[in-house]
Image (cartoon, rainbow, N blue to C red):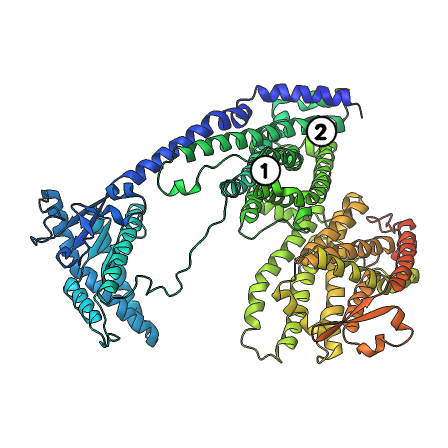
């Protein structure tokens, strides 16, 4: 590779991008100018919205007991945590008594009188609404569906009338004071002052606070009203306790003191740990979006792709130069947006003033070491997004089409971002090797820890190494796209669903295409997600002793209907050679022998590896997965049924789908090794749970190798059935068998709760490892059983190398 050519391509692309207004807008204008302006504008609009005075109407204000709740046309300032909130509520009452004249403004203007009149007309409707809701609750408890439906219709209509009337009169909150409330509270206080009074049957009248929960203005006013009423109620309670000669702490026998030990630095770190990882991910993928589309599909639209291809630079050098360009702009967009957001956010919080925002205190920017980690972790994220975006953009024929292809990447990224920000999601060994999640969660943990992040440094090793690996895979895929003439010079064509279906059914090939194999896997996953809901309903209400048998029946149905059937149907409908697609050939006996030996020697190795990773790496299996495999561990179930459900059915159905249809489709382009890896990854992904995903993907490599080298599905089916069967029987054999010679020096029986667990010792693992290495090496050295004349069919399957007559 000539790095001077890469440098020239890089400089060319950077100059072109700097001339592109969209790129300059995303990289510079948005974070430096528009982003702060929008932030400050939104803050000002929010503050103005919150500062507007809302109208609260109190009917029956003459019956409000002392201490006074209202002072003129405002609530008493003593009832608010922030005194400035008192001016944000305009209180209109119907008070008429001389006693309250000093506290309540009787000189209501004409508009206030009209508001009171409207509110007074709503009083009966509110009482009817409360009565209907009570009757609806009684009908619901009685199970009277007809009456409940009628009542709910009347309630909905009445709510609409009250809401419309309050909206027209600009009443945000309506408080209805019950008649006689003042007198009732005074009587209770007098009775409390007299010892020996039984007050258990007293049902005091209640305030009714009416608000519209679907109206933001009403909700905001209601929050402030609730704060004032609750504090006023505390004052009433204190007066009542004083009249009964009881201490103020009487209602709260424990009355714990809440001590917040969070420092200002920790509060700031908590804020930035939620903002910075999310913005870093979103802006990294956004920054790679437009440059990738312009460097890929844009080259085709401008007609400069041919000129670039005849330059002295190789295609690999061209792709690397383009990749570095996209990486530069992705990094620049992410870091500039983070810097702008940090300074803008700090400034916005500093000018927020009193109120709820003041509880955050002085939010300082993260320390210098945390900012270094932001820059460091931005590199693998931007590199991954740049490689994926560039590969997708190469496939597109136009910039518009490229945006369509890249939009799903943006949507998936948003979903991962939301998951990373979820409460309780922290960096673990498992998440540290996941793409996007690893860097995001590590940055989140680093920002939270601040100067005490030294214990998290070791996570940086798996995060950075795996991120480099994912980036390398993405870059390799982009280079592969650029090497194909059918990708670079695809002509625009209008997609017609009818023509496409006719093409699939009429222009068949002997084996499925790459796309058809991918569609088959997508159908299997979709059917699995749909079936999960019905499987839960099929086991509901069963007795405990009936559950294992039903679970095994459902597992067999799942294997046949969800995994095998889509592959078999697509093989019949979309290919001309069912036998070639599913490798229905009789293999050489030596491959059957290798499969029969590999299954028992690989089982101890994979089991111990899975258990080790399960203890130190993978999260615990969810309860649903444990219920699904519980019948396999139940010695009371018939052994033949357990073998059929967990060994024979998966061995046949999963091999037909993944080593049959899917592997044949991936192998059509001739890259057998890549096809084996891809089918193994999909085979692991089909198992969904991390422990099973890893183990299945690992075994999928061996199964794919057996299928390709033997040109038959039978060795893989034999291996699959034997491997699962060994796992089934291992858990059903009497533990005493493992403690007798010579098994006692090969395995160890450990007690796990009320059950036992068989663990393989190192002598057996060493023997199995040696045998497995030799057999896999032999398989790798075997020539693939490729049929030389698929179209003419001049060579029968029995004459293929390594194949025997069926």
Tell me the quarter of the image containing the C terminus: bottom right
Q: Position of residue 385 (x, y in %)?
A: 63, 36
**Between 448 and 681, which is closer to the camera in this rendering?**
448
Left or right, 247 with respect to 460, comes to left
Q: Secondary structure at mark 2?
A: helix
Q: What residue is disc 2 on?
A: 319
Tell me the quarter of the image containing the N terminus: top right
Say few, some or many: other residues with alpha carbon within 10 Å of mark 1 (under 14 / 14 to 19 / 20 or more).
many
Q: Position of residue 521 (x, y in %)?
A: 67, 54
Farthest left residue? Answer: 98
Q: What residue is disc 1 on?
A: 406
The residue at the point 72 percent across, 75 percent down is: 755
Say few, some or many: other residues with alpha carbon within 10 Å of mark 2 (under 14 / 14 to 19 / 20 or more).
many
Left or right, 265 with respect to 655, comes to left
Q: Position of residue 556 (x, y in %)?
A: 68, 69
Q: Position of residue 773 (x, y in %)?
A: 89, 55
Q: Is residue 118 above or below residue 454?
A: below
**Between 148 and 454, which is closer to the camera in this rendering?**
454
Can the viewer see residue 138?
A: yes
Report the Cα–Cα distance between label 1 and label 2. Answer: 18 Å
Q: Is residue 415 above or below residue 308?
A: below
């Amino acid at each position: 590779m000539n790095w001077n050519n890469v440098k020239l391509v890089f400089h060319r692309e950077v100059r072109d991008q700097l001339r592109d207004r969209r790129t300059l807008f995303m990289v510079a204008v948005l974070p430096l100018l528009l982003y702060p302006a929008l932030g400050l504008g939104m803050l000002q609009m929010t503050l103005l919205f919150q500062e507007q005075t809302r109208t609260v109407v109190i009917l029956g204000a003459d019956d409000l007991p002392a201490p006074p709740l209202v002072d003129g046309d405002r609530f008493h300032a003593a009832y608010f945590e922030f005194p400035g909130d008192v001016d944000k509520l305009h209180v209109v009452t119907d008070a008429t008594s001389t006693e309250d004249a000093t506290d309540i403004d009787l000189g209501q203007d004409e508009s206030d009188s009209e508001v009171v009149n409207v509110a007074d007309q709503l009083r009966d409707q509110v009482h009817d609404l409360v009565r209907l809701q009570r009757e609806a609750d009684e009908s619901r408890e009685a199970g009277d569906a007809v009456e409940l439906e009628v009542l709910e219709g009347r309630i909905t209509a009445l709510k609409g009338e009250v809401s419309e009337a309050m909206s027209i009169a600009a009443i945000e909150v309506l408080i209805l004071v019950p008649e006689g409330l003042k007198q009732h509270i005074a009587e209770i206080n007098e009775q409390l002052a007299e010892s020996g009074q039984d007050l258990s049957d007293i049902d005091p009248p209640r305030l009714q606070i009416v608000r519209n929960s679907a109206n933001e203005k009403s909700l905001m006013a209601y929050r402030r009203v609730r704060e004032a009423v609750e504090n006023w109620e505390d004052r009433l309670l204190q007066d009542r306790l004083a009249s009964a000669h009881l201490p103020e702490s009487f209602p709260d026998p424990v009355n714990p003191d809440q001590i917040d030990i969070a420092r200002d630095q920790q509060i700031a770190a908590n804020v930035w740990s939620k903002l910075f990882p999310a913005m870093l991910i979103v802006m990294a993928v956004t920054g790679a979006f437009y440059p990738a589309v312009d460097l890929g599909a844009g080259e085709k639209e401008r007609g400069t792709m041919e000129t670039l291809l005849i330059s002295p630079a190789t295609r690999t050098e061209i792709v690397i130069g383009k990749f570095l360009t996209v990486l530069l702009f992705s990094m620049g967009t992410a870091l500039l947006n983070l810097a702008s957001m940090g300074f803008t956010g700090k400034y916005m919080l500093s000018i927020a003033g009193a109120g709820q925002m003041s509880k955050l205190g002085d939010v300082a920017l993260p320390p210098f070491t945390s900012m270094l980690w932001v820059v460091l972790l931005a590199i693998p994220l931007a590199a991954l997004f740049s490689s994926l975006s560039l590969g997708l953009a190469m496939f597109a024929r136009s910039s518009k089409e490229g945006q369509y292809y890249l939009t799903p990447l943006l949507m998936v990224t948003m979903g991962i971002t939301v998951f990373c920000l979820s409460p309780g999601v922290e960096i673990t060994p498992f998440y540290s090797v996941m793409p996007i999640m690893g860097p995001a969660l590590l940055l989140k943990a680093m920002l939270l820890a601040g100067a005490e992040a030294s214990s998290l440094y070791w996570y940086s090793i798996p995060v950075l190494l795996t991120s480099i690996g994912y980036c390398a895979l993405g870059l390799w895929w982009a280079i592969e796209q650029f090497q194909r003439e059918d990708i670079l010079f695809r002509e625009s064509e209008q997609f017609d669903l009818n023509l496409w279906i006719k093409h699939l059914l009429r222009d068949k090939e002997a084996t499925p295409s790459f796309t058809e194999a991918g569609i088959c896997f997508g159908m299997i996953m979709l059917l699995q997600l749909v079936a999960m809901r019905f499987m839960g309903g099929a086991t509901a209400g069963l007795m405990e002793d009936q559950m294992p048998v039903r679970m095994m029946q459902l597992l067999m149905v799942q294997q046949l209907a969800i995994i095998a059937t889509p592959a078999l149907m697509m093989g019949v409908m979309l290919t001309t050679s069912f036998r070639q697609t599913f490798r229905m050939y009789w293999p050489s006996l030596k491959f059957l022998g290798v499969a029969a030996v590999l299954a028992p020697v690989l089982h101890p190795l994979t089991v111990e590896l899975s258990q080790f990773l399960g203890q130190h790496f993978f999260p615990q299996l969810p309860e649903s997965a444990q219920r699904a495999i519980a019948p396999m561990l139940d010695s009371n179930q018939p052994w033949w049924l357990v073998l059929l459900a967990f060994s024979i059915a998966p061995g046949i159905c999963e091999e037909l789908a993944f080593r049959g249809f899917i592997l044949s489709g991936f192998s059509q382009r001739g890259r057998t090794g890549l096809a084996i890896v891809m089918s193994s990854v999909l085979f692991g992904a089909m198992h969904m749970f991390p422990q099973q995903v890893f183990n299945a993907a690992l075994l999928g490599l061996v199964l794919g190798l057996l299928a390709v080298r033997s040109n038959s599905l039978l060795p893989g089916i034999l291996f699959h059935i034997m491997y699962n069967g060994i796992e089934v029987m291992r858990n059903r054999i009497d533990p005493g068998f493992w403690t007798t010679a010579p098994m006692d020096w090969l395995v160890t029986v450990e007690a796990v709760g009320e059950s036992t667990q068989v663990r393989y010792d190192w002598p057996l693992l060493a023997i199995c490892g040696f045998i497995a290495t030799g057999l896999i090496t032999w398989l790798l050295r075997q020539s693939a059983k490729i049929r030389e004349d698929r179209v003419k069919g001049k060579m029968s399957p029995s004459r293929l190398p390594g194949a025997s007559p069926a």
